[in-house]
Image: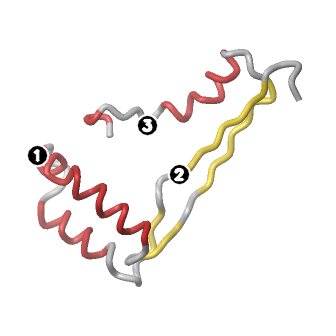
């Protein structure tokens, strides 16, 4: 993600950013979703990997065979996997209810 311009640390700074923007009662919560191979979520995961697979191989992070094995595993209903952590952050303007 970093090589493609993503900032995986951004979400960890959101509560601080909301407080710095003047919001109060800032809170955050996370949700971790598990799914199985062959599900819609696995199709999304596979599509994401297919889009960047060549870059992963070029960077030496995985081989073509490893990516193919992962994609095959994502179609196996016996596989349980977790999606990325979903984090929600909230706050309110002072004086607003």
In percent of width and height, residue 88 lies at: 64, 43
Q: Is residue 29 above or below residue 45?
A: above
Look at 40% across and 32% down and name the residue there: 7
Secondary structure category for the residue under label 1: helix
Q: Quadrant of the C terminus?
A: top right
Secondary structure category for the residue under label 2: loop
Q: Which mark is residue 85?
A: 2
Q: Which residue is mark 1?
A: 58
In percent of width and height, residue 82 lies at: 48, 63
Badge 3 local density, few (<14 within 10 Å), some, or many (20+)?
A: few
- Mark sitting earlier along the chain (2/3): 3
Secondary structure category for the residue under label 3: loop
Q: Which residue is mark 3?
A: 8
The reply to whether callout 1 and callout 3 are in contact (CB within 8 Å) is no
- Mark sitting earlier along the chain (2/1): 1
Nearest the viewer among 29 and 44 is 44
Badge 1 local density, few (<14 within 10 Å), some, or many (20+)?
A: few
Look at 30% across and 55% down and name the residue there: 48
Q: Quadrant of the N terminus?
A: top left
In percent of width and height, residue 69 lies at: 21, 71
Q: Is residue 34 above or below residue 6?
A: below
Give the total number of marks visible in the rendering.
Answer: 3
Q: Quadrant of residue 15?
A: top right
Badge 2 local density, few (<14 within 10 Å), some, or many (20+)?
A: few
Q: Is residue 67 above or below residue 84?
A: below
Q: Which mark is residue 92?
A: none
Q: Quadrant of residue 59?
A: top left
Relative horizontal placement of residue 37, taking residue 61 as reference (left or right): right
Q: CA distance from mark 2 to mark 1?
A: 27 Å
Q: CA distance from mark 2 to mark 3?
A: 11 Å
Q: CA distance from mark 1 to mark 3?
A: 21 Å
In percent of width and height, residue 23 lies at: 75, 21
């Amino acid at each position: 993600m970093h090589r493609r311009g993503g900032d995986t640390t951004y979400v960890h700074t959101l509560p601080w950013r909301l407080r710095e923007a003047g919001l109060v009662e800032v809170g955050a919560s996370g949700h971790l979703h598990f799914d199985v191979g062959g599900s819609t979520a696995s199709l999304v995961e596979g599509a994401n990997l297919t889009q960047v697979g060549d870059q992963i191989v070029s960077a030496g992070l995985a081989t073509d065979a490893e990516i193919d094995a992962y994609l095959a595993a994502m179609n196996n209903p016996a596989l349980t996997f977790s999606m990325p952590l979903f984090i929600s952050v909230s706050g309110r303007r002072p004086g607003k209810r």
